[in-house]
């Protein structure tokens, strides 16, 4: 049985200001890891077949909103040429025009490409340069066995957008958090 997993990806070339931001965002990420670990049993109880994703989101919200100062369900200002009106689960302001988007996913993480949509949302957002993506280590079928393992797939898929300047998008850092038991 594995617990909370966390993987950080950072763009290959950073300005000094972005490097300082990465340290600040990484400190927030560590607090989220500890929170998820502390609430692992509670998350396991609500992360079952056919459950609502809002159950897991409310547990994560208790740290992001109430302790770290993230705002919930904020509509992002449309960027010139884009009219997406994206509404991430959580947004955290780092400074003028800089911030973190946090998304909590469950069943459609990879089957509906929510992970790729969340990275794209961060890429086109005017005020966000960092993404926290909270995903299940495993999703369950009716029999209670793992039908897919989103965490590993998300790390592999989204990690490919970092480490090589040619493939990188305008996201300074990505933190992928895996919640729930794996077996």
Image (spheres, rainbow, N blue to C red):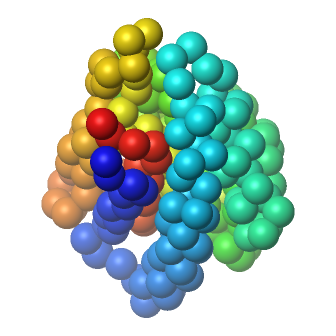
Query: Which residue is drawn at the image coordinates 40% and 26% (left, top)?
Result: 139
Query: Which residue is drawn at the image coordinates 66% and 22% (left, top)?
Result: 52
- Number of numbered tags placed on the structure image: 0
When asked about the image quadrant of residue 16, the answer is bottom left
Residue 48, x across and y down, in percent: 53, 24
Determine if residue 98 is in view.
Answer: yes
Residue 182, x across and y down, in percent: 32, 40
Say left or right for 153 vs 53.
left
Q: Is residue 47 above or below residue 182?
A: above
Say left or right for 19 vs 53.
left
When asked about the image quadrant of residue 181, the answer is top left
Query: Which residue is drawn at the image coordinates 31% and 24% (left, top)?
Result: 146
Question: Which quadrant is home to the C terminus?
Answer: top left
Between 42 and 65, the one lying in front of the other is 42
Residue 5, x across and y down, in percent: 36, 57
Q: Which residue is most to the top?
A: 142
Say left or right for 144 vs 45.
left
Q: Is residue 56 above or below residue 66?
A: above
Residue 136, x across and y down, in percent: 43, 38
Say left or right for 53 vs 176.
right
Determine if residue 78 is in view.
Answer: no
Between 1 and 49, the one lying in front of the other is 1
Query: Which residue is drawn at the image coordinates 63% and 46% (left, top)?
Result: 42
Q: Is residue 112 above or below residue 153?
A: above
């Amino acid at each position: 049985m594995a617990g909370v997993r966390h993987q950080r990806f950072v763009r290959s070339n950073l300005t000094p200001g972005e490097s300082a931001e990465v340290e600040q965002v990484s400190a927030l990420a560590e607090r989220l890891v500890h929170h998820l670990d502390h609430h692992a049993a509670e998350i396991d109880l609500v992360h079952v077949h056919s459950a609502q994703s809002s159950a897991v989101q409310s547990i994560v919200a208790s740290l992001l909103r109430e302790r770290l100062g993230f705002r919930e369900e904020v509509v992002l200002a449309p960027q010139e040429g884009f009219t997406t009106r994206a509404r991430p689960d959580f947004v955290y302001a780092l400074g003028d025009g800089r911030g973190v988007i946090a998304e909590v996913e469950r069943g459609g993480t990879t089957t509906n490409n929510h992970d790729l949509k969340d990275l794209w949302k961060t890429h086109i957002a005017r005020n966000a340069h960092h993404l926290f993506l909270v995903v299940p280590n495993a999703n369950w079928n009716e029999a209670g066995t793992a039908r897919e393992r989103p965490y590993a797939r998300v790390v592999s898929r989204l990690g490919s957008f970092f480490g090589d300047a040619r493939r990188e998008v305008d996201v300074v850092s990505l933190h992928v958090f895996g919640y729930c038991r794996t077996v």
